[in-house]
Amino acid sequence: MTETTLEKNLFSRIFTTLKQAIKGDESFDYTSGSIKKGVILLAIPMVLEMLMESVFALVDLYFVGHLEQSSYAIQAVGLTESVITIVYSIAIGISMAATAVVARRIGEKDPVAAAKAGMQAIIIAFVINTIISIFGFIYAKDILLFMGASVEAAEYGLNFTRIMIGGSLCIMLLFLINGIFRGAGNAAIAMKSLWLANICNIILCPILINGFGPIPAFGLMGAAMATTIGRSIGVLYQLYHLFNGRGILKIIPSYFIPDLEQIKALVKIAAPGVLQFVIASCSWIFLAQLVATTGGDHGSAGYQTALRIMMFFILPAWGLSNAAATLVGQNLGAKKIERAEKSVFTTAKYNVIFMAIITVITLIFSRSLISFFTNDLIIQKIAVEALQTMCLGYVFYGIGMVLINTFNGAGDTWTPTMINFFGFWLFQIPLAYLLSKYYKMGPTGVFIAIPIAETAITLASIVLYKRGKWKRIKV
């Protein structure tokens, strides 16, 4: 066979795999097929899915960063997003439980049990988020003030915060239903729902913020309206694919009748999962408050700008690491522990390469990236410092994400919960406080504490992964 023919065959295989990943291929068996191909089939749509989630924040940041009172607007968006990370935490925790159980049932070749578990998870999410939405809508201003916003910034961002938290059910359902699809091995549907939601947001943002024809300019509030409408459309797309009966999960109305035993089983897995992400979210909230109180409106706006750009790079890496959760869950269900371990190693290798490239890009182009989102020179200076400091831990973030998803995919949700508790609350927060307040470093101390703590968390995760408790968990 000639070299040219070999190259054509290689290109053909790559193209076919990419096409399968984007289109979605539920016929691929993740418990017996090529591990590399399995990682690619899962990772490509998951990376694109998370890329779209990160674009949500950047689109809002771009348009509100060019409003007249940009320091107030950016601060309101950033602080609200920091609080909404609690909603993300609950959504990811429940989603992670759904992914683990659905993946395990699919690995056991029991799609009916997988479908029932997914629907019970939706019931749990709906009940929890109703309480959060009501509380957030009523106490929106108090939340912003608690986060360190000035009175002026809190007044300016009040309606934005009300809409974002009040409409957070669409955030929770978007994450949860995508987790159900990922557990079933159909990451492409999850990706497409985020693409649709994001396209709607990109179209609606400039229209609702700046006005268009008969549509008035809503300013900052328009950004919240666009984001909530876009995500709601994404959820409707997910629901359509859940109920059309063409996928591996066949949903019927009776699956929505509360099953207390199934709910208890899901809560048992989800509770520490929610807790682990709430612990991390509360840490980020504390850091945001610390920056706001030591750096003022411009310091807070600079940090929030850098954080949004950092998330733009981090979320795709999280998407790639999600492949480990599905592969581990399905292979443990099929009693193939060695395949589960190989899946973790392969996913981690790809994530390290990705994050190393992103580190170099961030260090070289940070100023150009920041200046695109804000014209304020003071905000730019602080944001560049924050981004260049935080990116030094990217490679460790990449490894840590894979290991966290490995534990969660196996149903071992307590291990990463304890890692997060010690890493964030007993190490990162005290370190950030010590550097920023005691040593008078201000926001710079917070920026330094972030990569140090994330590196320590990853090292602890490696030690606990090697102990192998995650291989013996029953779900």
Image (cartoon, rainbow, N blue to C red):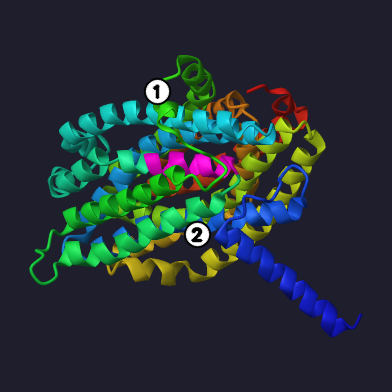
- Which amino acid type is shown beneath numbered disc 2? Gln
State the residue at coordinates (39%, 66%).
Answer: 370
Q: Which residue is mark 1?
A: 257
* Residue, far right: 1
Residue 240 x %, y %: 40, 48
- Drawn side of residue 230 relative to residue 360, left or right: left
Within the image, what quadrant is residue 188 found in? bottom right
Task: Compute the Cα span from label 1 to label 2.
Answer: 50 Å
Residue 467 visible in the snapshot: yes
* Magenta-highlighted residues: 173-184
Q: Secondary structure at mark 1?
A: loop
Q: Secondary structure at mark 2?
A: helix
Q: Quadrant of the C terminus?
A: top right
Q: Nearer the viewer, residue 51 or 306?
A: 51
Q: Quadrant of the N terminus?
A: bottom right
Q: Main secondary structure of the magenta part?
A: helix
- Which amino acid type is shown beneath numbered disc 1? Ile
Q: Earlier in the sequence, mark 1 or mark 2?
A: 1
State the residue at coordinates (7%, 68%).
Answer: 214
Q: Is residue 204 above or below residue 300?
A: below
State the residue at coordinates (68%, 37%).
Answer: 330
Q: Which residue is mark 2?
A: 388
Residue 369 x %, y %: 42, 68
Q: Nearer the viewer, residue 332 or 32?
A: 32
Q: Is 128 a magenta residue? A: no
